[in-house]
Amino acid sequence: MSSKPLILIVDDEPDVLLTLRVILEASGFEPALAADGETALRRIDAEDPDLVLLDIMMPVLDGWFVLAELAGRSERPKVIVCSAKSADADRARAHDLGADAYVVKPWDPEELVQTIRDVLARRPHGRLRV
Amino acid sequence: MDVIPTEIRERIQYEARVAGVSDDTGISIESVERRRVQIWIVAGFLVVALCAAFAVASLNAGIAGRGWFQPGVLQLALVALAVGFCAYAFEKEVHLHRLSRLLVDERVLSSALSKRLQQHSALMAAGKALNSVLDLDEVLDVILASALDMLRADAGSVMLLEGDDALRVVAVRGSELGRNARVEIGTSIAGQVASTREPLIVNGPVDEEGFPGRRPRNDAPDSAMCVPLQHRGHLLGVLNISSSGPRVFDEYDLQLLSLFAEPVAASIAKAGLYEAEHAHVAELLEADRLRSQFVASVSHELRTPITSIRGAVAASRIASEHSQRMDLLDVMERQARRLADMVEEMLTAAKLERSESMPLLRRVDLSALVRMAALDSQVAGRPVDVAVPESCEARADPESVRRIVGNLVENAHKYGAPPVRIALQPDGDQVVLSVVDSGSGVPASEREKIFDRFYRSDTTGQKPGVGLGLPIVRGLAEACGGSVWVEDSPEGGAAFRVTLRTRAVEDQEVAGV
């Protein structure tokens, strides 16, 4: 077992997955990848990540579906939504579905890593304000 | 209209005063008759009395008298008195006779005036009602209700001009005439009125020869009128009114209906303008909505590659392995190209909108171009089956053809489903390029909209894009002198067809095309 926090990166853009993987690895995290909502839920069940970086607009099952699915669970990982959608309505919807933070693309890599650390430092499984 | 009754009233008052008719309870034919009876009773009574006095005077002719009381003088005086009183009664009778005639005239005029006032007030009420509504259906309803009420008619209809040669029934009341029925101009009663623009009245059975094309009706009216509806010299349609009962229309009714037709035509024109304006506003709102959606889509589409590039730059600084850094450089290159393509697409759309930089058309081998474009798509991860002849010539711009094929294949993969096929089919002076997918096809209601700028059939925002791919295809196809449309493929799925010319337009004109 690794002591590094396991971060599941969920995004349908291969280049975003590749980039984030390098950044998170270099920042001391253990990255795992999913390119759609269905794979994400499967990997969450199998690997119990500490945090999920979740894109919204994805094929098969989108980020909203994944958030709603996780919201109904008593045990769930922390979630940071990373989306190009910047409307207040989307932020509010993510908050209502239990997201721990909302980061709008294009994100600053350093700020994103800091946000991940902040969210991980919060008490586990608590629903925190976005 | 008001002068005649006033003048008559003054004469009536004068004659009544002279004839001694009291106007305490109003001067009427009855009061004139009473006065006449009074005068003749008094006249008769006096004549009888004078005759009796004359007889008494004659019986006493032997009695000698003095002065005025001599019998001869008395008799003369009695005769003179009787004659004078008869002259007085006769003079009164002359005035009473005039008074009777004037009263009858006044009654006739009052009745006519009252009828006219009623019709005017009905016209005004109808005008007010017409002004209070803007919706065409409501306007037509008010028109028919007002016309039937004003003319005490049983049935009516409004027909509006459709094209240049026909009338279409748009509103009906009390008639078996079907809404949407069509009448050719020049035929039937309404068609003739539309042709001559003259109001028409028909009483009794209709002369079939006089109105060729008239359809026999079970509820043929006994009396009917038809007036043209014209606004600023333009014919809009006709208004029909009919009666099947004892009510028979006359020229005066026709004149009234013609008067009514003027505000009616203005209201119909106004309602038409209102509808056009309404549609225009809806179009503007839709264009505004599409623009907002475009801005949202563009910002989303731009953010995605920028995210990758910024992330890759940051990651390459901290990447520990050479191979990782090479991968990240590839990411930067791919995403920079993606951004450039997107900017290029928007510039192309803007140029096509302003009809700038029309492509230079030249003779090209469409088969070779299609094969190359298909290869590009293949490399971009969008496989496509190509079924084209060995060579197929057309007049087009090679870059435009490449983009047309590329955009259609991308669209087929995004909104349809694989496998995607491309085919070329020569057809006379043109070639039809088809891109067919295996998806569920495009609903008929969206087949034109999908070529509008910024329109996106995906309302969930799940599919990337800004709504410019197909408008660019249409713009480029038209710039090459061709066209594009979508239909259902016989095997299912959507079939996008693009026509391109095989010869220059001027060559086709020379050949008599």
Image (spheres, grey):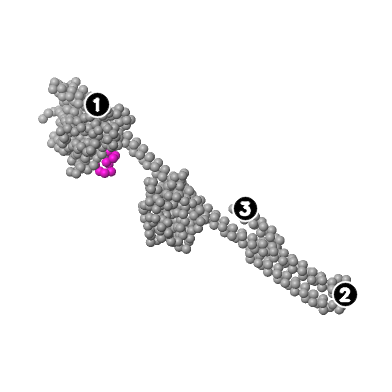
**Residue B306 % position (x, y):** 24, 26
Q: Residues within 10 Å of mark 1 (few under 14, many from 20)?
A: few
The kind of residue on which mark 3 rests is Val
What residue is drawn where x is 50% and y is 53%?
B255
Q: Chain of mark 3?
A: B
Horizontally, residue B262 falls left or right of residue A113, namely: right
Q: Earlier in the sequence, mark 3 or mark 1?
A: 3
Q: Nearer the viewer, residue B456 or B351?
A: B351
Which element carries disc 3, helix, strand or loop? helix
Q: Residue at x 48, y 48 (%)?
A: B262
Q: Is residue B204 magenta?
A: no
Q: Is residue B153 above or below residue B348?
A: below
CA separation in Å, label 2 and label 3: 63 Å
- Left or right: where B25 falls relative to A10: right
Where residue B340 is drawn, which disc sits there?
1
Q: Looking at the image, tell me whether mark 2 or mark 3 is earlier in sequence order.
A: 3
Dot 1: chain letter = B
Disc on res. B3: 3
Find the magenta span and give its range. Answer: B442-450
- Lower sequence index among marks 1 and 2: 2
Question: Which residue is under mark 2?
Answer: B65
Q: Is residue B448 magenta?
A: yes
Amino acid type indicated by mark 2:
Gly
State whether discs 1 and 2 lie on one chain: yes
Q: Is residue A9 left or right of residue B446?
A: left
Element carrying mark 1: helix
Q: Does the image show residue B405?
A: yes
Task: Pinpoint residue A109: horizontal percent, then vertical percent.
Answer: 22, 25
